Amino acid sequence: MHRKTDDSVPTGDETSSQPTMAEGTGREGATGQDAWAHRYQDLGLLGSGAMGEVRRVFDIVLQRTTALKTVHQAGHPEAVRRFVEEAQIAGQLDHPNIAPVYDLCIDPSAAYFTMKLVGGRTLASVLHGDMGSPFYASVQKNLEVFLKVCDAMSFAHSLGVIHRDLKPENVMVGTHGQVYVMDWGVAVTLGNGSDEEANRGAVTLARPRRSGSLQEAGTIVGTIAYMAPEQALGLADDVDVRTDVFGLGAILYEMLTGHPPFDGAPMDELISRARRGAVVPPEVAAPGRDLPPELCRITARAMAPRRQDRYPDVAALKADVDEFLRAGGWFATARFAAGAVIVAEGAPPDAAYIITNGRCEAYKTIGGAEVHLREMGPGEVFGETALLTQHPRSASVRALEDVEVKVVTSASLEHGFATRSWLGALVKALAERFHDVDRQLSRCELCGGSRPSRVPPP
């Protein structure tokens, strides 16, 4: 279980007046369930925590099932203030991937709000259920969920709202593709939003005051297992959109490794690691998984210890994940200096290459002399015939200038064919035929014949 720090009552200079009671919604003198039992039929507990609990209820007036959240310390002004802020912030974030709030009631001895009842499972449960499957079989559907979380957070950030507790447990995945970012209980609002509507005054969010340092207030807000360094250090003034970018990176990290970034140690050690941003790289933390290098790179950048080294906003992070899903994400990037031999004739095949920058030359050695075959540039592929057929390299490829390539290994190629086995069979059959043609052409050359200008890749 991931431990969430106590964020209930800061002890610093942050002050607030007691929220006023909503007229006509509470019953003076009611206690606990009595405050809402006149309208809602209790259908059982959905979950509980240090701050409050969520119950499944039936709204007798509107004839619908909903979720009702209560606060434990209904008589404590600070606890109620935070509870009201959670309801107000979530209630004003009108987005398809944020559960809507329906109603809020503050009673002298009770506080509750109702919100959409979200069915399905948490993303944490989804990821745990995927543990027995090959990573590539589940990565696409999980990343599609992640992109919807990015949409929700980008919208919240446009209104100046920082979640501060992003983790798989706070993402709900419905049975029909619904995705909701939940639990805005420790969210904080910045001084201003960037969204045009917010700047025009169309949306006015509740804006709680922020103390100079949460550490001065005697509390660290969030969940240590997924926490950015500025949160773990209690630096409230350093919390911004990049803090949530770190949290999104932590979600990606758990998708890759099966566990949170900071886990498996006593709390003191976890806090120390979180403060330093000492994250074990995903490929090191999960050596048994064949992880896509590009997604590991994206995760590492999102979780950089220094805020300025992370993605500047959620949109930039989402764009990189989108690109990963569209092209080449399973492939590592390699660079070769001008003159370097990238593949050697006769060598066993270990990879194919897609040129992204620079130019290369393919050549064969015939009678002790190099014979130029063709020149290749960005977008062209070489080495795939040998990789697919597992025959030795039929030619060499040398970098004519500094070259950058995507490295396509057998494993990454199989990932691409995993959901289209017929395509894999077709490509491999074609590769065998190319190899046969290349072998016949080589025999002609040895007999003194000429070789055409366009030849199969080495």
Image: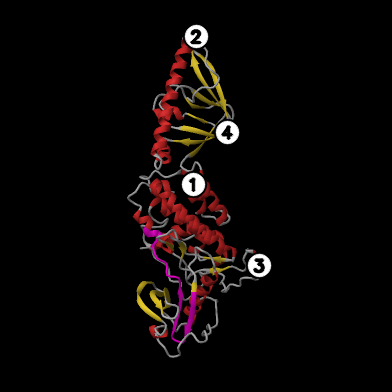
Which residue in the protein does label 2 denote?
448
Question: Which numbered tag is attached to residue 433?
Answer: none
Q: Residue at x 52, y 61 (%)?
A: 152
Q: Residues within 10 Å of mark 4 (few under 14, many from 20)?
A: some
Question: Which numbered tag is attached to residue 325?
Answer: 1
Pick whichever, 15 or 81, lies toward us.
Answer: 81
Against 283, is 13 above or below? below
State how the image is colored: secondary structure
Q: CA distance from mark 1 to mark 3?
A: 34 Å
Q: Residue at x 43, y 53 (%)?
A: 142
- Residue 55 left/right relative to 201: left
Pick whichever, 429 or 15, lies toward us.
Answer: 429
Q: CA distance from mark 4 to mark 2?
A: 33 Å
Which residue in the protein does label 3 denote?
199
Residue kind at label 2, given as amino acid type: Gly
Could you tell me which secondary element the residue under label 2 belongs to?
Answer: loop
Residue kind at label 3, given as amino acid type: Asn
The N terminus appears in which quarter of the rendering?
A: bottom left
Image spot of residue 339 (x, y percent): 56, 26
Pick whichever, 72 or 95, lies toward us.
Answer: 95
Front label number (4 vs 2): 2
**Of callouts 3 and 4, which one flags the residue occurring earlier in the amino acid sequence?**
3
Which residue in the protein does label 4 denote?
378
Q: Residue furthest left?
A: 132
Image spot of residue 434 (x, y percent): 45, 24
Q: Quadrant of residue 31?
A: bottom left
Q: Quadrant of residue 422?
A: top left
**Which range of residues does the magenta coloring cover?**
102-125
Image spot of residue 32 (x, y percent): 39, 84
Image spot of residue 370 (x, y percent): 52, 16
